[in-house]
Image (cartoon, grey):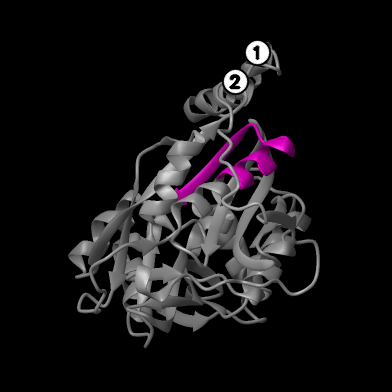
Amino acid sequence: MPISLAPLSESNAAAAQKLLLRFWHQNWPAEFGARFFQWRYRERPRTAALLAFDGDKCVATIGAMIRTYLLGGNQTQVCETCDWFCLPEYRQLGLGLKLIREVMERPEPIIVVGGTDATRGLLPRLGWQVLPEVGNYFLPLSGRVFAAFGLRRFRAGSERWARAIPSGINVRRVRQAPPPSPSAEMFTLNSGPPSLPTPPVAEFALAALLDGENLEWLARAPSEVGKLAALEFRIDGAPVAVSISMLETRPEGPCAKILHFQSSTPDLAVVEWIVSETAMHLASRGAGLIFCRASCPLISSALRRTGFLAGKPFPAFCWPAGLKVPAGPMHLTRLVGDDSIEFRSG
């Protein structure tokens, strides 16, 4: 039977969900798998997927979501890809390549950060432009949680041996930055429409922007995925920044991912205060290990000064190859494509 392509729809959602659960490498209960798929694909703003079928069997997929970026000083609609997967027995047919080429026909520019080794090797060969790498940072606070992560990397389940480490042993502490002004205040965003300051246009060649729709979507994440921590920062009563994080309960222990910073000022003292207060807030809520990605030089500097360590950076790519991305700093974070799935329940 010939292979056919179709967009995700109500009629083929069950077949797509079955394939994606295999790609996500999760042994989830069926009820949670259905809720997670519903949240990730059916509830996420401006998200679609292209599927390949062998008869009624879904054998390959690629997701695409549209988000607003600053590009060369202008707000531009950009496509981010996610969940690019083909069953091993169908890869010789070139289905994965066919799907990415279909996405490359979209009118929007495409941004990819990270991806599998195969993705990283293929995109440059397809003519994608290689962007500056995105920094990968982590702040190990709890010795037990940090050791559990190291053990789990070698074998799932071995993280239990880290329980022999007393829970009160700390590896590092958050380095607190002073407030940049006596009027500087931090607030938790619990409800209501947030104020989302736009980064200074002149500071970035390329910058991902958070919008209210995606913030609301993150807040609706299944509880098993994590709990959103959204913070607003004000000076003289005016909002100057937000930080968005996800608190997770993982097999290794309580952790947090800083998904995004968005600030209207390039002042290093303000940025250091925002990063430091965010890390302290997450630590106060029990996070034993905090992760963050950042390509912005100011944020990267603030992370290091707060105590974060640098890991192996992530490559970044854009399409089309001739896209006019001006020279200059870029602001790419975890708020791109695949990052909401980076979660392990067991």
Q: Where does the N terminus fall, quadrant-wise?
A: bottom left
Closer to the chain start, of discs 1 and 2, is 2
Name the residue type under label 1.
Ile
Residues in magenta, as a range = 276-294
Residue 283 on the magenta span: yes
Q: What is the secondary structure assignment of the residue under circle 2?
A: helix
Residue 346 visible at all: no
Residue 143, numbered circle: 2
Relative image position of residue 323 (x, y in whole percent)? 25, 79
- List the single residue furthest toward the bottom: 107
Kind of residue indicated by mark 2: Gly
Give the number of the disc on residue 165.
1
Say whether residue 127 is magenta.
no
Q: Residue at x 37, y 88 (%)?
A: 107
Q: Give the structural element (helix, strand or loop) at label 1.
A: loop
Is 32 displayed left or right of 113 in the figure? right
CB under 8 Å between discs 1 and 2: yes
Task: Residue at 79% x, 72% y: name it.
Answer: 192
User: Above or below — where is 169 with respect to 212?
Assistant: above
